[in-house]
Image (cartoon, helix red, strand yellow):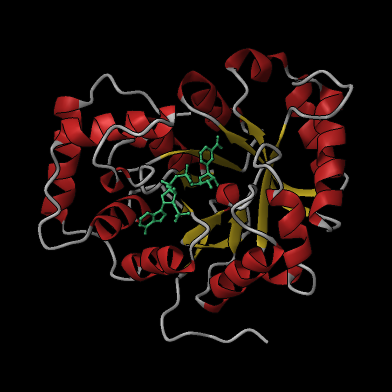
């Protein structure tokens, strides 16, 4: 039986979708590999629920993440807002076609062991695919068929801006963190004006403070470069708190996704978000620092 801990994350509306999501969501990109097994995922999900983390975000491309979550969700599906991503990876079907989205939704339903997906994102397709219309329409048909509650888009730049303005998506997912601020005054602000939900991916900026030397993974390496260039001073806060509170309370952000396979790290983010927004002076300094040093830094896909 799931217990309830003495600290809990708040729930928030996901734009105008009618869904309510925990302000901190579990990014399930870290539970698809050999380092974890079903028992770990079951424990992680249980611990997430204990502190009110009910939003879980996975994707076809996260290894065994969907399958493992599907097994861990048995008996607890109704307590979770389940998000995944499609558009590629259906054997024998070309990526980024309507058929690939149709079959991708059905396959995700099967792997996740459920009869409906709360959020399904088109996972980082370009503006050309969005403008073509067939892929967007295929996701809309999955919503009309009751397989998907909310059609969503995940990406950056021009494609994200198009998705926010299109009216075809109830929610979007994009990088928002201390090292990923490019979207804040543009697509995130526009999403807020339009009632489009925003899930902040890489909300801890891939936690670059962990590395003494430039890490090998390209996306984390870029985050590390940015982190060093910004020469941040966390003051009395620890890094998790600085990053989690910045992203969780950035205007327009509905929820932050924290990618982790560690219960302690998920709980640290929940505790941090529970301390509320950073002081306005601190936020202004972080925004000014990014504007000064990172004016050319686009959103990290
Ligand atoms: N749509 C997309 O294209 C896309 C792209 C990237 C991410 N995302 C979504 O966003 C989620 C998060 O992104 P992300 O995992 O790339 O980046 P992130 O959440 O910024 O950082 C995750 C990394 O930080 C570590 N970490 C987590 N909490 C920590 C803490 N409190 N202290 C120290 N280290 C901590 C994790 O390792 P441990 O496992 O050891 O905690 C992991 O290596 C993903 O799981 C996914 O749901 C989506």
| Res. 13 in view | yes
Q: Position of residue 218 (x, y in %)?
A: 42, 27
Specify whether 193 is left or right of 208.
Answer: right
Residue 147 showing in the rendered view: no
Residue 289, horizontal then vertical, whole percent: 14, 35
| Residue 266 place in picture, x, y as percent | 45, 64
Q: Residue at x 62, y 66 (%)?
A: 40
In front here: 74 or 100?
74
Left or right: where 98 falls relative to 129: right
Is 140 left or right of 298, judged from the image as shown? right
Q: Quadrant of the N terminus?
A: bottom right
In the rendered image, the vertical position of residue 56 relative to residue 263, given as above or below: above
131 or 205: nearer the eye? 205
Residue in view at x 73 percent, y 66 percent: 72
Indicate whether 249 appears above or below 95.
below
Image x and y of residue 298, in percent? 36, 23
User: Which residue appears at 64% of the width and 42% of the height?
Assistant: 62
- Picture mark count: 0
Q: Residue at x 53, y 73 (%)?
A: 52
Q: Where, by quadrant of the figure, is residue 290 drawn?
A: top left
């Amino acid at each position: 039986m799931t217990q309830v801990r003495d600290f809990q994350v708040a729930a928030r509306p996901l734009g105008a979708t009618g869904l309510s999501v925990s302000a901190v969501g579990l990014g399930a990109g870290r539970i698809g590999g050999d380092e974890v097994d079903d028992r770990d995922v079951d424990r992680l999900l249980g611990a997430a629920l204990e502190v009110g983390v009910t939003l879980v975000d996975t994707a076809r491309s996260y290894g065994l993440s969907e399958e493992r979550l599907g097994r861990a969700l048995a008996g607890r599906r109704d307590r979770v807002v389940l998000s995944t991503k499609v558009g590629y990876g259906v054997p024998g079907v070309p990526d980024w076609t309507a058929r690939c989205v149709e079959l991708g939704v059905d396959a995700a339903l099967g792997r996740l062991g459920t009869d409906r997906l709360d959020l399904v994102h088109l996972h980082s397709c370009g503006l050309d695919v969005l403008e073509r219309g067939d892929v967007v329409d295929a996701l809309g048909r999955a919503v009309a068929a009751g397989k998907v509650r909310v059609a969503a888009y995940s990406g950056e730049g021009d494609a994200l801006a198009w998705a926010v303005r299109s009216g075809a998506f109830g929610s979007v997912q994009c990088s928002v963190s201390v090292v990923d601020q490019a979207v804040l005054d543009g697509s995130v602000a526009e999403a807020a004006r339009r009632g489009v939900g925003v899930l902040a991916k890489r909300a801890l900026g891939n936690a670059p403070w962990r590395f003494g030397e430039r890490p090998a993974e390209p996306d984390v390496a870029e985050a590390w470069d940015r982190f060093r260039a910004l020469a941040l001073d966390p003051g009395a806060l620890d890094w998790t708190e600085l990053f989690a509170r910045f992203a969780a309370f950035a205007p327009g952000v509905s929820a932050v996704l924290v990618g982790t396979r560690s219960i302690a790290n998920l709980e640290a983010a929940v505790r941090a978000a529970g301390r509320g927004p950073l002081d306005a002076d601190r936020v202004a300094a972080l925004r000014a620092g990014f504007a000064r040093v990172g004016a050319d830094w686009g959103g990290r896909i």
